[in-house]
Amino acid sequence: MPDPADPVAPPPPPVPDPEGTARPTSTDLPSNVAAALACFPLIGGIVFYLLEKRDAFVRFYAMQSIIFGAAWLLFGIAWRIVYGILASIPAIGWLFAFLLWLIWAAVNIGFLVVLIIAILKAFSGVRWDIPWVGPTARKQVDGL
């Protein structure tokens, strides 16, 4: 009679990940972790786009991050210019300043929500296109 403390069969071998999230990248990070880190606007995207040469999944998220971060930065610059002009109007400038601040807050919350979704999707190994940004990033990565 076999001893119950002895294992009956060896553990099964690891099953390859169908999404490819366990593939090592040029940075020796798993693909999903590298893509999630690449999602951080501008800096993460630039670093991983320059470092990653083999994994199209990571390069896609890096390019998407570069474009998304640039859009976020341009919005901030445009907002500051418009805010400076409209807030300086005598007598009603405070009203414009308040309304512009509400718009700025809403848009930045929207950018932050999209960023969090992109990071979660990348970490789970799913390729997700940010609206308007994703198709452009896909063309840039696939065209190279």
Image (cartoon, rainbow, N blue to C red):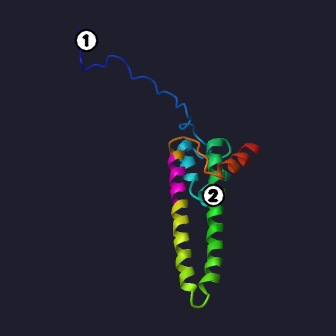
| Type of secondary structure dominating the magenta stretch | helix
Does label 2 or label 1 sit earlier along the sequence? 1
Q: Tell me if I can see residue 55 in this picture.
A: no
What's the CA distance linking mark 2 and mark 1? 61 Å
Q: Which residues are magenta?
A: 112-120
Give how far across and how far down residue 118 sits, in percent: 54, 50
Count of number-bearing discs: 2
Q: Tell me if I can see residue 5 in this picture.
A: yes
**Residue that numbered label 2 is attached to:** 68
Q: Residue furthest top?
A: 1
Residue found 53% across the figure and 60% down from its top: 110
Tell me the kind of residue under disc 1: Pro
Disc 1 secondary structure class: loop
Disc 2 secondary structure class: helix
In the drawing, does residue 112 fall left or right of residue 71? left
Give how far across and how far down residue 47 sits, in percent: 63, 56
Q: Quadrant of residue 104?
A: bottom right
Q: Quadrant of residue 46?
A: bottom right
Q: Quadrant of residue 65?
A: bottom right
Tell me the kind of residue under disc 2: Phe
Give how far across and how far down residue 4 sits, in percent: 24, 17
Give how far across and how far down residue 106 sits, in percent: 52, 66
**Residue that numbered label 1 is attached to:** 2
